[in-house]
Amino acid sequence: MSTSATSKTTDTTTDTLINTPAVEPRDVAAAAGRPWLRTGWMMTASGWSANQFSALLSAYRSELGLSESTVTGLFAVYVVGLVPGLLLGGPLADRRGRRPVALAALAVNLLSSCMLMAGSAATGWLLPGRFLTGLSAGALLAAGSAWVKELSCPPYAPDAAAGTAARRSGLFVSAGFASGGLVAALIAQWLPHPMATAYVPHVVLAAVAWAVAHGAPETGRRADRTRSEAGSNAPDRAAVPDWRRFRRAVLPLAPWVFAAPAVGFATLPGLVDGGLAGWRTVYAGIATAVVPGSGLLVQPLARRLAARHRTATGVAGLGVIAAGLALAVPAAAAARPGLALVAAALLGAGYGLALSFGLTEAAAAAPPERLAMVTSLFWTAAYLGMLTPYALALLSRWWSMPVLLAAGAVLAALTCGALAALDRGAEADRTPA
């Protein structure tokens, strides 16, 4: 064999060592136990913690006498804590591993619900409780999403379908969104001491999820181990994320991912509850279940669209969000709860499509060594949309809600067109002259 051929073979072997995860015996053993399912419950607990408070907004106004601006502000404080949680949790999980960051975040998430329970007797606990809910949920989304994704790939899941790994964490989060709000609302409607007892299910869920996930294998530092085994001077060819793809495909869509459901379960119920005397909390809980529930139901459609074209899921999601906001206009103007639920279902379907697309594109743009960091950036941009109800409340001083919702529908449609245009530009760049 010639010297050049030997050199080429050595380079190929080195590349394989760098880019192929090291498989430890315990990793292979864990594959048979579907470890992604064990960590997925952590994501459900994260989604549950976010939405249980949303379903209680009207109850906080009626039971504790909090003003509309105070309640809306407490809703927004979640995002204020979430953003640093995401931005710190992602890089930390890439450096220290998924497991310690995710488990620590879930423990703080459980503590935050205990603080919100204490807020039923002393409202001063509500603000730090909501902030810690956001902070812990952000770190958990960053570390946990990467952990679930990696445990959904070989060697842990040898038969995983293409695209399933990236979307799976979003499905678990959506399940928590759908369940947490509805359960909290039903408890608040019929059980005593609702502002405290409504948080008990999440405390139990978070404790069980922590115990179940504790034995799941670490995945985040395997690339570091393989590089050290291959040699400290081995080239790191895949460590730079595809920022061009991230800017073109992910950033234009990301804020709509949670702007849509936030309008569906935080804004619309308050606009149509005039004829729901005695049932406002239950209606709010139904809305918080309908929105993410619709997002779960459209996942088979999301898979089919993704198989046809790379950006079809994102374009469809923005189109459905625009339709949902357009339908919310007459629902708010005429205060029609039934029509508002239909609009909420459309907003939820758009959320499900957009979330599926965003997670898949973020994972595609990220090298393994930067997966948690890039995923955290996607979640950060997406959760900025949760500030939409607060922004609408401020703008309603000058414009009516139907006008603002109509403007949102137009903006969503324009974003849909922009995403399609950016994709055509990317296709043109990839096509050889």
Image (tube, rainbow, N blue to C red):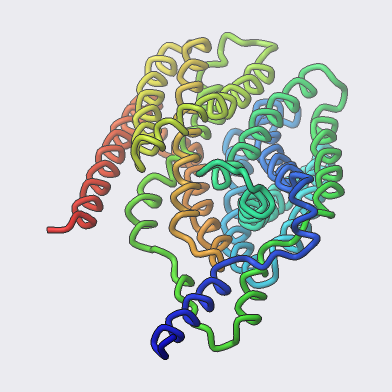
* Residue at x 41% of width, y 88% of height: 2
Tell me if residue 70 comes above or below residue 300 in the rendering.
below
Is the C terminus in the top left, top right, bottom left or bottom right quadrant?
Answer: bottom left
Above or below, 224 relative to 304: below
Q: Is residue 298 visible?
A: yes
State whether residue 200 is above or below residue 132: above
Residue farthest to the front? 1
In the picture as drawn, the residue positioned furthest to the bottom comes out as 3
Determine if residue 81 is in view.
no
Up-down relation of residue 57 to residue 95 (above or below): above
User: x, y (%) of residue 149?
Assistant: 61, 51
- Identified at 22% across, 44% down, the residue is 421
Percent position (x, y) of residue 165?
58, 46
The x, y position of residue 103, in whole percent, is 78, 57
**Quadrant in the rendering for residue 70:** top right
Relative depth, front residue between 159 and 399: 159
Residue 429 is situated, as x and y percent measured from the top left of the image, at: 21, 57
Give residue 72's quadrant in the image: top right
| Res 49 → quadrant | top right
Q: How many labels does the image show?
A: 0
Q: Residue at x 63, y 24 (%)?
A: 289
For residue 79, side relative to residue 302 (left or right): right
Q: Is residue 165 left or right of residue 357?
A: right
**Residue drawn 86% across and 27% down?**
193
273 vs 381, left or right, is: right
- The residue lying toward the viewer, choosing from 348 and 327, is 348
Quadrant, the N terminus: bottom left
